[in-house]
Structure formats: structure tokens, C-alpha cells
Image (cartoon, helix red, strand yellow):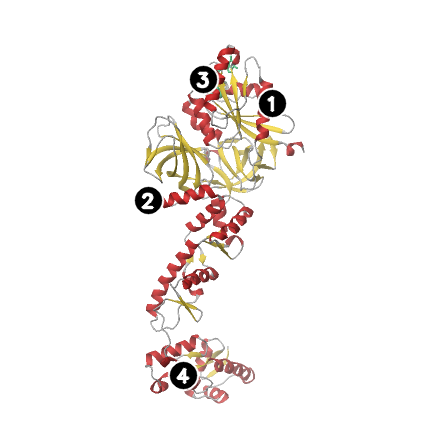
Amino acid sequence: MAEDSKRYLVMGTSGHIDHGKTSLVRVLTGVDTDTLEEEKRRGITINLGFAHLDLGEDLRIGIIDVPGHARFIRNMVAGATGIDLLLLVIAADDGVMPQTTEHLHIARMLGVRHGLVALTKVDMVEEDIRELAIEDIRDVTRGTFLEDCAIVPVSSVKQTGLEELKQQIRQVAEAVPLRSDDGRFRMAIDRSFSIRGAGTVVTGTTVSGTLHVDADMSLYPSGRKVRVRGIQVHGNDVDSVSAGMRAAINLSGVSHDEISRGEVLAEREALESSYMLDAEVEMLEGSHAALRRGSEVELHIGTVELSAKLHPLESDSVPPGSTALVQLRVSEPLAIAAGDRFIMRSSTGRYTLGGGIVLDPHPTKHRRRRSEAAEKLGDLREEGLEARLLHEVAKKQYGATRQDLLPLLLIDETSLEAGIASAARHGLQAHGSGRQQLLSTTENRERIIRRSIQMLESFHDDNPLTLRGMGSQAFANGITAGEGSLPVELVELALNAAVQDGRLLKQSGTFALPGRAVKLTAKDNEALKELRARMLDSLKPDQPADIVKDVSVDKKRLLMLCKLLAEDGELVVLPGAVYFDAGLVESMAGRLRDHLAAAGKMTVSDFNQLVGTSRKYGIPLLQYYEQSGLLKRDGDFRMLA
Ligand SMILES: Nc1nc2c(ncn2[C@@H]2O[C@H](COP(=O)(O)OP(=O)(O)OP(=O)(O)O)[C@@H](O)[C@H]2O)c(=O)[nH]1
Ligand SMILES: [Mg+2]
């Protein structure tokens, strides 16, 4: 289908009030985007207007017409977020005016990299005035993405220069690189309304990913669940919409007045809301004072604006004309992602202070150690995915699952895979598989070590005479990470590192604290020899009380050694603290089973005769078999359970 091979781009107008933006869109597209009664009455644009322009078979430009009035700049910012190219409109009779410059810088700080200038109302001026205006334009665009751009003289009234303008737009559009469309779907909503018969419709510019009809999605930050009933692009029904298009999306599960501009449509569980963000900001040159810690700014991000407090991370203040790493704290939840761009305006809303890019959408509060935080953010800025991945994983206490990371990084599985592989050289390790695969950094593993050492301290307090420490499974069960316990391989990896640096001891397959676990002496070893000789392979084994007088360790120590033999699986402790050879307990069970299968039931003395032991051992043995579920008891008789 021709529609499918078509390239879609979004162009935003901008420029000072009354310079002819809306008139130009109207003569280019035939659409009057000033639709509000108030807009018509006052002859100015208040809200965003939408139209589209076909430039040949293969290129369709969605147009967002923004208001020039300084009071509606919030709408301008919402409109300019996510556009591919800028059409800066400057009236030849008026020249460069305050919002000409302000809009240009807002677009630049929002990441717009392509565009051109329409010099409007040329029918109103002489040649020399036009030349003066062009000189001014060259001055203000110097050093920006519009440096040396096309400046096309037009008149909407006389309808001149329009073909040349279209040609230039096409040329600029061709230079816009294709969007990488591998992210997850996101769209910041700029309008929500209701259409008879269809219900709730929201519109916006799609930021990334692809959306299909029937998809189950959520609105953020509310988390409200919705379903996509239908999608329209430029008035046509389509099955899906991909990044960089203006789209109207019909939603079920929500009423239009429950949605406000600024909300984000994304996959279920895709975003986490946040009250803070770490960012790199650029402050515009200007007369405003330097921003100190806690300064209030008006933050415009996506299609939302809200008040935020700015906390510089590298110094005490951020002067005009500087770039800096900062933390912004807001009072209402935000649904944002790393790489999102934003604008900061003065808290009175009178002028633009600067703009920035989100480096960490879910930071912790940086109070002290701000310089350390700044250094980490610096790495994030420089190194991209790998650093962000390490940063996000390290922020979770004992590691993060893939499921945790996908929404934080807003990338797909393939990019995550590549990120994990390359971050391995910085100590990132993966355990398990699938979405629950747990990733850990050296920081996470250090926390596991510290927690394990605490656990071992109480373990050694409770077991002063043990020869061993705790097995890795016991640590894994004891350290909970989110919903489940830690993978045992991760615990082992962490603890083995602590064995390497001497903080832990590994003995008989367990981890212990150096100096706390008991070490075997020569006397212990002699006593063990005696225990083995008199307890193993015997149907009437001596007990510690019988043996203690023949060894040179005391009773307490001897019992500890018995416990060790039991831990090692040589002895079994029967009810009544009777020790018995573990192998014999096992083989007698087999004989019991055979016997009872034939005989049906037996008494204690039948049992003693059968295996060749005495009452002293017979009763504890039978009790043991009852407890282990092999036998059941009925009065004086035992039978198979
Ligand atoms: N002579 C002449 N007048 C024009 C031209 N373009 C626009 N105008 C007039 O300029 C006035 C403002 O035009 P708009 O298109 O509403 O200006 P705008 O930039 O959209 O204004 P805002 O959206 O409010 O910022 C209107 O009275 C237009 O008729 C032009 O090329 N020549
Ligand atoms: Mg207008």
C-alpha cells in the first residue's frame, strides 16, 4: 500500500505573536487551525492546532501550529516536544522579536535539530527592510541548529513563495534521520476529548515504539488501565502507529474528562512514576539571577508543566549561561524516562530559564555526597546505556531483574541484552533466566556480603560451638529481594569474593566468620576417632555419656563433635538424643519395609529381634521411623504408614 511506504514527520511552527504562523499553515494546507471561538474572536492562537501537508506521494508532514503569545508558551512547549523539524516564522515588517528567540531556544533545548525560517508578510515591506530582517535572523540563529538554514520569503496574503517553501521543507525533511523505532511505545497526550459513537479520544505525538489496535495499555502517572479501540493518523483509520507520528487514539476503559494533558500512554507496567529527576541543564544567557539550591522553577516536560525545586549537584548555584548537573524535585508524580528533554521557566512563568535532559528518572535524594552523585551522573551523560544499566542495577538493594529494568531504561530486550553483555566488564553479573533474571553489580554484592556478615554474627552467637558456618542456601533464604529470595548462585558469587579478601572463611562447604567458627584441635581429632570407633557400624552404639570418660575433651565439646558427625551425615540423632549410625538407620528401614509388607504389623520386641538391637535403641528407632513417615503406631503395634 502507498500509505505504508510513506514517510511521516512532524513539523512545529514557532515565532512571535502575529507573525503569521497560522495564516501560513492555512495557505499551505487549507486548514484553519484556530478553531476555538476565542481564537477567532481575538485573532490569536491560544491552543495547539493540527494540520498536515503532503509533499509528494511519499512524504506527509504533520504540522503542529503553536501560539506565539508569551502567556501561552506552555502550549508552545507541549507542541514542540517531539517534533522533527521547526518552521520558525518571522514577519519581515517586525523582524526578530522576543518570542522568536525564545521559541528557537526552546526548540533547540528540546532536541530539535532540523528546520528552516519562513520570512512572512514580505508583501508589506520594501527590499531593504527584508534584507535587514534576514541579517537579524542570521545573527540570532548563529550557533544553533538553524545556522545557515534556508530563509524563504513568503506572503500568505499574496500567496507567494509557497512552492519554494514546500520545496525547502521537503529538503529539510529528507535530512532528518529515520527514527530508531526499537523502543517501547510512548505517547505524551496533548488533548483528550469525546466523539459521539467512539468515546474517548486522545491525541499526541508518538515518541517511540509501535502501538496496535486492541493493545492493553496504561495511562501514567495514574496507572489507569485502558484498551486501544482504534487508531487514526491524519484522519485515516490504521491498524498501528509508530514513532514520530501525530495520532488520535480511541480508548476504552476511561472517560475523556479523566485524562488531562501531560499524561502518558504506554504499555502496562512500562513506567514508574517519580517525584525527582537528575538532569543535565543548560541555563540561557540572560538577566535572571543564578539559581540557588531550592530555587523554584516551572518545569515543562512532555506535555505537562509543574513546579519543581532545583538542587545543583556540583556547586551551590547555577548561573545564567552555564551548564550543570542538578536534581529537580516535583510535588506531583511524573512519568518520564532517561533522555527526555524539558524546559525550565521562571516560577512566575514570565521567561525561559533554560532546559535540560533527564539522566536519571528515578534518583535517590542527594543530600551529602553530592559530588559523588554528580560524578556518577557525569558518567551517565558520557557513557550511555552501559553506565545507566550499571547505575539502575546498583540502585536496587541486592540487584535488579530484567523486569525492573525495562521500564527504567525504556529499551527493548535486545538492547538490554547488549547492554548486559558490555557491562560485564564492569562487574555486572546475571543469574537465572527470563524476565526474572537477576542482575547484580559489585555494589549489590557488597550489600549481600554485609547482610551475610550480620546474619553470621547472630548465627555464631546462637551456635558458639559449631565448627561450621551457614550454607549459601540459608543466606539466600534469609535475604529477601523484593518478592522472592536471592538466587543461591548470586549469594555464592558474593560470598566467595568475601572469602578471597579474608572477610569470611569457607569450611566444609559453609561460610563462617573468621575467629568465630571453632577449629578442630588434636584432642578433637582423637575424640572423633573414638566416637567413630564406638558408634559407627554398631547396632548397640555407645553414647557420648559412655565415651566421655575415655577421651580428653569435656562433655560439651564431645557433644559438639557428635553434632558435627551428624551434620556430615555419619550419625543420626534419634528421639531422646540417641545417636545411631546413619547408614544402619537407612538399611534397617529397608528390612522393616520388607518384613511388614509380609507380616502386616510388629511389636517393639519383634523389631529388636528382627534387626538385632535392644529396647534402649529399639524404641527411639521406631519413633524415628514414625516421625519420618515410614511407620504408624496402633497401641503396641507398628505397621507401614
Ligand atoms: N499582509 C500580510 N498579512 C499577513 C500575512 N500573514 C499573516 N498576516 C496577518 O497577520 C495577522 C496575524 O496572523 P496569524 O497567522 O494569526 O499570526 P500567528 O503568528 O498565527 O499569531 P499567534 O498564533 O497569535 O502567535 C493576521 O491579521 C493576518 O491576516 C502576510 O503574509 N501578509
Ligand atoms: Mg496563530
Instruction: Report the amino acid beneath label 1.
Output: Gln
The part of the image, by quadrant, that contains residue 228 is top right
Give the labeled residue for mark 3. Answer: 42
Which residue occupies 53% across, 56% down? 433
Q: Earlier in the sequence, mark 4 or mark 3?
A: 3
The x, y position of residue 634, in whole percent, is 46, 81
Q: Residues within 10 Å of mark 2 (few under 14, many from 20)?
A: few
Quote the CA–CA distance across marks 1 and 2: 54 Å
Q: Please give the label number shown on residue 608.
A: none
Which residue occupies 45% across, 69% down? 509
Give the labeled residue for mark 1. Answer: 167
Q: Earlier in the sequence, mark 1 or mark 2?
A: 1
The x, y position of residue 487, in whole percent, is 47, 60
User: Is residue 480 toward the left or the right of residue 31 in the image?
Assistant: left
Instruction: Report the amino acid beneath label 2.
Output: Arg
Number of numbered discs overlaid on the protein picture = 4
Give the labeled residue for mark 2. Answer: 367
- Element class at badge 3: helix
Q: Are marks 1 and 2 in contact (CB under 8 Å)?
A: no
Give the labeled residue for mark 4. Answer: 531
- Element class at badge 1: helix
- Element class at badge 4: helix
Of residues 155 and 135, the one nearer the viewer is: 135
Q: Nearer the viewer's eye, disc 4 or disc 1?
A: 1
Quote the CA–CA distance across marks 4 and 1: 98 Å
Quote the CA–CA distance across marks 4 and 3: 103 Å
Q: Residues within 10 Å of mark 3 (few under 14, many from 20)?
A: few
Instruction: Report the amino acid beneath label 3.
Output: Arg
Q: Earlier in the sequence, mark 4 or mark 1?
A: 1
